[in-house]
Structure formats: structure tokens, C-alpha cells
Image (cartoon, helix red, strand yellow):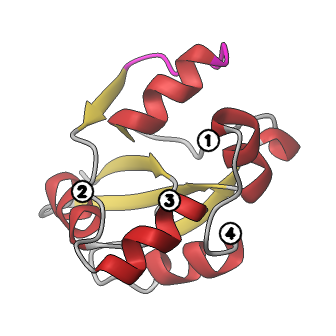
């Protein structure tokens, strides 16, 4: 029997930490569905817009070999998640969702991804 694991995050700017999160939830007999927070969702939760638009972020994670499907979640779809057996959420994103009153019952936090080490990318991610 296959397990459906949903991973929620912003995935902006995609980096090695995001790869580690996807790897952590993948495995044999596992369908990994990545729920990428929309631009408006990030703005509502964190007060800023992402560096990359949501359509590009969902396309990037959707192309990963360990990812079965990628979708967008946010205020426009009332934060509705795909059906899952397990829910994993980026630690920073989970804190922002809880602070906004969005209840993700049974969510398992994943260690926050590290910021890019490249100076230009660090400036871009801080500006986003």
C-alpha cells in the first residue's frame, strides 16, 4: 500500500535545503505531493512577496524525481490541501501558518531550509 505524504513550503529560492526536505519525506512506496504556497499566501503570512513567482516554484518542485505531483495552496483555495496520509511542513512556514490561525492538524515540522550561500542569492532572498 502506497503512502501519500504532502510537503508544504514556499520553495523560494530553491536550494539544497529544499532537496533535503523532499528527500526526507520520500521513500519506497511513497507518493510525495508538494504543496507550494502561492505568492499571495506568502504575502499574507510573511508580509513580503517571493523572489520567484508561484508558477515557477511549483514547476521546479514538480520536476523533481521524488515528487509525484505539485500543487499550489493559499488563500484563494482556502488553504485546502490534497488528501494525505502524512503532512510535513517546513518549520518556518508552519510557524507562519499557525500564527495566521490556519490549523494543520497532525502537521510534522521539517527543519527549516538553509538560505543560499551565494552572496547574490542571499541579497535576492532578503529582498524578496
Front one among 100 and 127 = 127
Residue underneath mark 2: 114
List the residue tagged with mark 1.
81
Point out the stretch of residues depicted in magenta: 100-106
Residue 9's x, y, as percent?
Answer: 47, 50
- Looking at the image, is mark 1 or mark 3 earlier in the sequence? 1
The picture quadrant where one finds residue 119 is bottom left
Closer to the chain start, of discs 1 and 2, is 1
| 1 lies left or right of 95 | left
Tell me the residue that label 4 is attached to.
54
The disc label shown at residue 47, or none: none
**Of residues 106 and 99, the one drawn nearer to the viewer in this rendering:** 99
**Real-space CA distance between mark 1 and mark 2, rounded to the nearest whole angstrom:** 25 Å
Q: Is residue 105 magenta?
A: yes
- Residue 126's tag is 3
Q: What is the distance, in whole Å, between disc 3 and disc 4 at their CAs? A: 17 Å
Q: At x 44% / y 59%, what residue is drawn? A: 33
Nearer the observer: mark 4 or 2; the answer is: 2
Q: CA distance from mark 4 to mark 2?
A: 20 Å
Which sits in the foreground, 57 or 30?
57
User: Is the stretch drawn in magenta largely helix, strand or loop?
Assistant: loop
Amino acid at each position: 500500500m502506497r503512502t501519500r505524504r504532502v510537503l508544504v513550503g514556499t520553495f523560494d529560492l530553491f536550494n539544497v535545503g529544499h532537496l533535503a526536505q523532499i528527500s526526507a519525506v520520500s521513500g519506497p512506496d511513497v507518493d510525495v505531493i508538494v504543496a507550494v504556497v502561492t505568492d499571495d499566501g506568502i504575502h499574507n503570512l510573511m508580509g513580503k512577496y517571493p523572489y520567484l513567482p508561484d508558477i515557477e516554484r511549483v514547476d521546479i518542485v514538480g520536476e523533481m524525481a521524488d515528487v509525484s505531483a505539485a500543487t499550489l495552496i493559499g488563500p484563494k483555495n482556502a488553504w485546502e490541501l490534497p488528501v494525505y496520509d502524512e503532512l510535513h511542513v517546513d518549520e518556518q512556514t508552519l510557524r507562519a501558518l499557525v500564527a495566521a490561525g490556519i490549523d494543520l492538524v497532525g502537521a510534522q515540522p521539517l527543519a527549516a531550509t538553509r538560505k543560499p550561500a551565494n552572496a547574490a542569492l542571499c541579497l535576492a532572498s532578503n529582498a524578496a
